[in-house]
Image: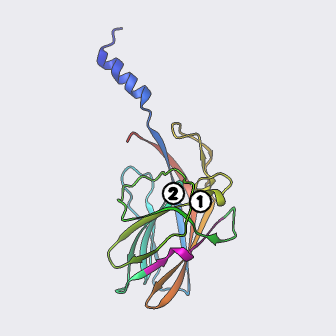
Amino acid sequence: MKFSFAMILCAAFLAGCQGTVLTMHQVQMNVKTDPPVQRTEYYDGASPSAFPFDYPCYRDEIVELCVIVGKYHLRFNVTAQLQNELEFLWGEALISSSEQPKPRALRTGYFYLDIPVTHELGSWPVSGYFAPPTVSIAQAEKRFGFQINVSELYAYPAMFGTQTMGYKQKGFIDTGIGRQLILQVPVRFNEQTTIYHFIFTATDVAQWRSYF
């Protein structure tokens, strides 16, 4: 059999460019508030076509939001339901997990605002963590996200303790399914404060290859 130069070049390219394996969890989100709020509703938000699962979303009389749970970080798309501005007091937030149930102060490795909807889910861990800032939200949607210190929450330092076979190979040593992440954050509006308790439970997990 004869091989053309183009065929050899193509085979070499495929062998050397296996892509990076990305991981995403399907997450069930439950929200509790103190004091209780009215007109609560859950729904699925459509994700970009590259992602295997839709986003969990929630709305009530105060706020509407969707959340993406990544390997090391959380990303929020938030819109205020009231005419007045909301403030998410992230510097006063608490975080815990099903493995480490005692709440501790939320510290973030980075905090970014107005990120594009296709921003990469995977991010490398960082060495320093700090108290996150307050985020003000009006009726226009605001996108923001932050990296958390997952090594304080799970035995393996990734969201839900998920351990993969590596960034080039598909497969899991530990899927993390069934584990939880718990986040408490005060939301201030009209000189009142409501504590939002977010409970994220991993219900499924998927992997795909990215060549970009």
Q: Which mark is residue 26?
A: 2
Q: Percent x, y for residue 161?
A: 63, 53
Q: Percent x, y for residue 153?
A: 65, 61
Q: Label 1: which residue? A: 149
Q: Main secondary structure of the magenta part?
A: strand
Q: Please state if 11 lies on the left or on the right of 207 as rendered.
A: left
* Viewer can see residue 86: yes
Q: Percent x, y for residue 38?
A: 47, 86
**In-front residue for pair 112/41:** 112
User: Which residue: 49% across, 90% down?
Assistant: 192
Can you name the residue that lies furthest to the bottom here? Answer: 191
The span from disc 2 to disc 1 (Cα, nearest Å) is: 20 Å
Helix, strand or loop status at disc 1: loop
Quadrant of residue 57 in the image? bottom left
Quadrant of residue 198 in the image? bottom right
| Mark 1: few/some/many CA within 10 Å (<14, 14-19, 20+) | many
Q: Please state if 10 lies on the left or on the right of 155 as rendered.
A: left
Give the vertical position of 209 relative to 194 (above or below).
above
Work out whether mark 2 precedes mark 1 in sequence or the reverse, and give the earlier one.
Answer: 2
Range of the magenta residues?
A: 87-97
Quadrant of residue 35 in the image? bottom right
Q: In the picture, which quadrant includes the C terminus?
A: top left
Give the vertical position of 210 relative to 112 (above or below).
above
* Viewer can see residue 75: no
Helix, strand or loop status at disc 2: strand
Q: Magenta span has 94?
A: yes
User: Which residue: 44% across, 62% down?
Assistant: 55
Question: Residue flagged by tag 1: what amino acid is it?
Answer: Asn
Question: Residue flagged by tag 2: what amino acid is it?
Answer: Gln
